[in-house]
Image (cartoon, rainbow, N blue to C red):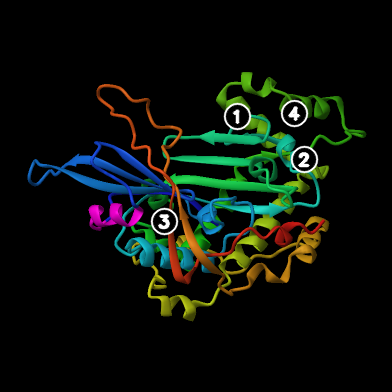
């Protein structure tokens, strides 16, 4: 469920970390890449002393890191995240319990019995607003404090064995999550089952605000009803004022539900619930022994009226049955995987500004290998068989 993330300054000795990574941090700004994680060594002014000191931030994809930086198209479980945090602490001294989290990306990869384009073509709007295309693979809605993305993960990752996978994700700041009664001030808070349940609820609530209606035969409808469908299946609804748009949208959704054009959305909600439950299944005792599993005590600031429903009534539908039957039994397997060594590579992020007088060139480091004699438990590597069921 957890993928991208961004931290504040890491609470550790940055020079010792740089030595572990084998990188020279004398330049003003240096970025070191380890699989899909990017360590950013930068100069900041210490507000208490006025002195400039070197700090390090961390961002990237935890899911892709667990797969050796290859892809993030499979299922990333709570137990996998636990093992990643254990390795980050053992290798680099990063204690997730005292590392402040700035933003996080969470979502699900859903194996569909049909082309994900069927879903994408049926998406009409979100809260009365349009989505922006992500090339030819999906859609995005970007607000100030969060982003909602729905796209074809199989096409995006380009790894054989991961076809017909739809990705639904939300990337949000901690400020936005707090407004939704989800508290994750520290990186280690992402190991809470309660937080994952709230992430699921937020995904489902967000899906409710998305109008997903398929273009189906309209025989038997009146001209007025056909005109209403044509209005929202095209782009003409965007010309309506806010009040009329809201009124017409309610009529459109009611009509679509009556004729069965929204069934695909109900199926999608079922798939999300099934996948989220599987992602949360884990061996809590094992993670407690690792010493990094977060306490399962709900924050007393959370409004009890916002508690997540523990059980949802799931309808039996064709798509759900297909997914459930095709799920590999190893999907929730909690066994660790031994990795002989950790390949560390350094590079500059693609979105960093070009070098100039005020922004010196980024450190161009070579590739280093940090070998471990005992091996580290690092989530599960690429497992195409897990989702390649068709």
- Left or right of 51: which side holds 149? right
What is the secondary structure assignment of the residue under circle 3?
loop
Query: Which of the two labelled residues, at mark 3 and mark 4, occupies the earlier sequence position?
Result: 3
Q: Position of residue 363 (x, y in %)?
A: 33, 37
Whether residue 18 is in magenta: the answer is: yes
Place of residue 292 in the rendered image (x, y in percent of width and height, measured from the top left) = 39, 71
* Disc 3: CA contacts within 10 A as few (<14), some (14-19) or many (>=20): some
Q: Which circle's residue, 1 or 4, is located before the other in the chain?
A: 1
Disc number placed over residue 130 in the picture, else none: 1
Mark 4 — residue?
A: 233
Q: Residue furthest left?
A: 49
For this rendering, which residue is in front, 250 or 211?
211
- According to the image, label 2 marks what residue? 118
Measuring from the top left, give residue 3's x and y in whole percent.
Answer: 51, 52
Q: Earlier in the sequence, mark 4 or mark 2?
A: 2
Q: Check residue 262 for magenta coloring.
A: no
Magenta residues? 11-21
Q: Residue at x 78, y 43 (%)?
A: 115
Where does the N terminus fall, quadrant-wise? bottom right
Per the model, the C-alpha gap separating discs 2 and 3 is: 33 Å
Judging depth in this view, the residue of 213 and 109 nearest the camera is 109
Main SS, magenta residues: helix
Residue 104, visible in the rendered structure = no
In three-dimensional space, the C-alpha distance between marks 3 and 4, rounded to whole angstroms, equals 35 Å
State the mark number for residue 181.
3
Q: Secondary structure at mark 4?
A: helix
Up the image or down, 349 lies above or below 71; here it is above
Of marks 4 and 2, the one in the foreground: 2
For marks 1 and 2, the one nearer the N-term is 2
């Amino acid at each position: 469920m957890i993928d991208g993330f961004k931290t504040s300054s890491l609470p550790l000795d940055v020079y010792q970390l740089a030595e572990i990574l084998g990188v020279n941090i004398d330049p003003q700004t240096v970025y070191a890449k380890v699989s899909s994680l990017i360590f950013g060594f930068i100069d900041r002014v210490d507000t208490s002393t006025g002195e400039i000191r070197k700090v390090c931030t961390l961002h990237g994809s935890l899911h892709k890191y667990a797969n050796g930086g290859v892809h993030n198209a499979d299922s990333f479980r709570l137990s996998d995240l636990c093992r990643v945090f254990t390795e980050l602490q053992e290798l680099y001294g990063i204690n997730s319990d005292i590392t402040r989290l700035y933003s996080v990306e969470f979502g699900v990869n859903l194996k569909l019995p049909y082309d994900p384009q069927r879903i994408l073509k049926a998406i009409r709007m979100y809260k009365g607003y349009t989505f922006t295309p992500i090339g030819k693979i999906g859609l995005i809605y970007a607000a100030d404090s969060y982003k909602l993305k729905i796209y074809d993960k199989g096409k995006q990752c380009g790894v054989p064995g991961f076809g017909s996978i739809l990705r639904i994700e939300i990337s949000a700041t901690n400020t936005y999550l707090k407004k939704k009664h989800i508290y994750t001030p520290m990186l280690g808070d992402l190991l809470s089952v309660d937080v994952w349940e709230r992430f699921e609820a937020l995904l489902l609530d967000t899906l409710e605000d998305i109008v997903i209606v398929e273009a189906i035969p309209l025989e038997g409808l009146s001209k007025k009803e056909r005109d209403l469908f044509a209005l929202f299946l095209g782009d003409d609804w965007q010309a309506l004022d806010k009040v009329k748009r809201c009124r017409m949208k309610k009529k459109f959704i009611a009509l679509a539900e009556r004729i069965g054009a929204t069934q695909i959305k109900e199926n999608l909600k079922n798939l999300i619930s099934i996948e989220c439950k599987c992602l949360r299944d884990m061996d809590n005792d094992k993670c407690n022994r690792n010493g990094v599993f977060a306490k399962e005590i709900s924050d007393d600031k959370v409004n009890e009226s916002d508690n997540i429903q523990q059980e949802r009534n799931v309808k039996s539908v064709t798509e759900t049955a297909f997914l459930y039957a095709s799920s590999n039994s190893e999907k929730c397997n909690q066994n660790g995987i031994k990795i002989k060594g950790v390949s560390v590579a350094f590079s500059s992020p693609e979105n960093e500004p070009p070098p100039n007088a005020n922004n010196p060139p980024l450190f161009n480091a070579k590739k280093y290998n940090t070998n471990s004699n005992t091996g580290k438990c690092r989530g599960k590597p690429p497992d195409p068989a897990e989702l390649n069921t068709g």
